[in-house]
């Protein structure tokens, strides 16, 4: 099951085990069970602290639990093989069960251990899903640190009947005590916030205790990360407040146009961005949703950002880098069937539509790439484009047109997503040339029609926004408000690209530096005057 490189890496990782661990498998006579037996046997052969047995009695077969030897109360179960994107999750489960400390704060571990009640999590993932590992690893950590929490992590492709029965049409999908708990990517902090009613109040109290920053970056994507590195290197007290560090990059799989790196993946790049920022004394405040900006009343004064938990932060300068999100179709049926056949991540959810008919809405690079990827998984793809021609790079268009199980509809306006009440069953579109309406029978709709800037919270603060909701900036990344700068996909800068966002974040930071050295802090001047 493991190639030579993986075997050598895993042997090194298992050298970090501090306590013996047990792998207990429940198998049948199928090929997947044979592969599971082979994998666990190989793992056990790499360390004297790992034992594998095959006498488990769980109904899900193949599946196996990982637990510390002698501690039957704390375990995590993998149903199916955790390979692909989940191999790292398997390695971490082995290490954590064996006493190797996780890279999370003591506060998070204490919060996990303090949870009372019984929590039986079941979570469905696909091996191609780049959003799933965060949830898998979060639930694994929680199950191995609290005996009242169990986590069963199910590879959907190995349990298709179960996936269909529970109506899982998007991953990651998480159930708690038999009921739907969450759909989509979540960190351990986000899961704890949903379970721990006092988490929000504690987070607000921590924010309220912070002293004002010289630079506060709102948003933690590529633009925000670059800005934070640049201002920290200038010696300014810098904070980053973000809903999730990494931003939309976390939802991006293959990245092939990041200059100097021929290929990387979004979650990997996001982790590298955060690691770089943490090399400097930057205060990263995650899971913070900004709701209001109160600009300073004069140059050198304090700006204030209010968050949804009621707390606020102050800073002499602000860099807005809140990014953008996927644009919705805005047609009947889209919201009703979200996660019931309407999806936005072909890499995550594509495997759940194996052999089925799906549509992709959008003929730009994202849409055409999605159609190409899906055509290798599903039975048939219909690409629907509003314009009279596809707008993607020609190399992608040529590749798409070469695929036999793809139909391309141009000059077509999507008017409705149809369904039977439980899941998608088709799509209506209007031929813009003739006005005729058509219905396409299918089981999934993947929406890929561009981005919307995350700027709604800035509409009433005096900040100039474009008609599209983008923050208007000049060549120095400055807004119309003194001391407030902006960068990345939330701004009017053309071409929403990762590498451009990084450059714009760096530019905004240098402009903030120039602003700060030219405008003395009025509060400090006032205090000095009072002291004299």
Image (cartoon, rainbow, N blue to C red):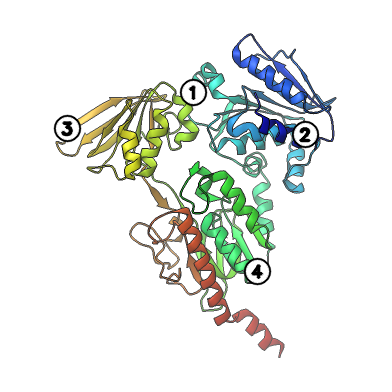
Q: Is residue 34 above or below residue 65?
A: above
Q: Earlier in the sequence, mark 1 or mark 2?
A: 2
Residue bearing the label numbered 3:
436
Name the spot of residue 406 as percent of width and height, x first: 32, 28
Per the model, the C-alpha gap separating discs 1 and 2 is: 38 Å
Characterize the local packing of mark 2: few (<14), some (14-19) or many (20 or more) Cα atoms within 10 angstroms.
Answer: many
Q: Is residue 351 above or below residue 503?
A: above
Per the model, the C-alpha gap separating discs 1 and 3 is: 33 Å
Name the spot of residue 152 as percent of width and height, x first: 65, 25
Residue bearing the label numbered 2:
14
Q: Secondary structure at mark 2?
A: helix
**Which numbered dot is residue 237?**
4
Quadrant of the frame with the N terminus: top right
Cβ–Cβ below 8 Å for labels 3 and 2?
Answer: no
Per the model, the C-alpha gap separating discs 4 and 3 is: 60 Å
Badge count = 4
Which residue is at the front of the view, 172 or 488?
488
Residue 511 visible = yes
Q: Earlier in the sequence, mark 4 or mark 1?
A: 1
Q: Earlier in the sequence, mark 3 or mark 2?
A: 2
Per the model, the C-alpha gap separating discs 3 and 2 is: 63 Å
**Which numbered dot is residue 167?**
1
């Amino acid at each position: 099951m493991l190639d030579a490189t993986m075997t050598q890496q895993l042997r090194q990782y298992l050298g970090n085990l501090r306590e013996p661990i047990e792998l207990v498998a429940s198998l049948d006579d199928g090929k997947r069970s044979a592969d599971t037996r082979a994998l666990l046997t190989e793992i056990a052969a790499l360390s004297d602290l790992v034992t594998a047995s095959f006498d488990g009695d769980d109904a899900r077969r193949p599946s196996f639990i990982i637990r510390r030897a002698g501690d039957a109360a704390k375990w995590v179960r993998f149903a199916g093989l955790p390979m692909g994107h989940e191999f790292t999750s398997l390695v971490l489960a082995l290490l954590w069960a064996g006493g190797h400390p996780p890279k999370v704060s003591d506060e998070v571990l204490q919060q996990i251990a303090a949870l009372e009640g019984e929590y039986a999590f079941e979570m469905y993932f696909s091996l191609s899903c780049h959003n799933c590992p965060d949830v898998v690893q979060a639930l694994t950590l929680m199950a191995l640190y609290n005996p009242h929490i169990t986590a069963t992590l199910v590879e959907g492709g190995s349990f298709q009947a179960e996936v269909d029965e529970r109506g899982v049409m998007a991953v990651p999908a998480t159930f708690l005590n038999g009921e739907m708990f969450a759909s989509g990517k979540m960190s351990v902090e986000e899961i704890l916030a949903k379970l721990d009613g006092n988490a929000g109040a504690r987070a607000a109290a921590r924010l309220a205790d912070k002293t004002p920053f010289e630079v506060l970056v709102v948003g933690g994507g590529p633009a925000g990360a670059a800005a934070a590195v640049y201002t920290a290197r200038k010696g300014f007290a810098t904070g980053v407040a973000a809903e999730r560090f990494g931003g939309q990059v976390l939802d991006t799989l293959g990245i092939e146009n990041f200059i100097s790196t021929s290929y990387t993946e979004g979650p990997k790049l996001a982790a590298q961005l955060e690691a770089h920022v943490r090399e400097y004394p930057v205060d990263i405040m995650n899971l913070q949703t900004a709701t209001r900006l109160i600009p300073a009343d004069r140059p050198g004064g304090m700006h204030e950002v209010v968050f949804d938990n009621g707390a606020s932060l102050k800073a002499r300068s602000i860099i807005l880098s809140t990014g953008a999100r996927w644009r919705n179709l805005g047609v009947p049926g889209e919201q009703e069937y979200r996660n019931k056949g309407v999806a936005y991540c072909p890499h995550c959810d594509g495997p759940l539509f194996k052999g089925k008919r799906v549509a992709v809405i959008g003929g730009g690079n994202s849409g055409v790439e999605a159609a190409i990827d899906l055509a290798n998984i599903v039975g048939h793809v219909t690409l629907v484009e509003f314009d009279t021609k596809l707008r993607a790079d020609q190399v992608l268009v040529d590749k798409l047109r070469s695929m036999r199980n793809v139909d391309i509809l141009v000059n077509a306006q999507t008017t409705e997503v149809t369904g039977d009440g439980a899941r998608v069953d088709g799509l209506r579109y209007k031929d813009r040339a003739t006005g005729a309406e058509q219905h396409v029978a299918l089981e999934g709709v993947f929406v890929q029609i561009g981005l919307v800037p995350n700027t709604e919270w800035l509409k009433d603060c005096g900040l100039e926004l474009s008609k599209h909701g983008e923050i208007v900036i000049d060549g120095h990344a400055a807004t119309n408000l003194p001391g407030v700068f902006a960068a990345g996909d939330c701004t009017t800068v053309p071409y929403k690209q990762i590498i451009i966002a990084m450059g714009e974040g760096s530019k905004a930071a240098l402009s903030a530096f120039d602003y700060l050295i030219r405008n003395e802090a009025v509060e400090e001047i006032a205090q000095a005057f009072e002291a004299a």
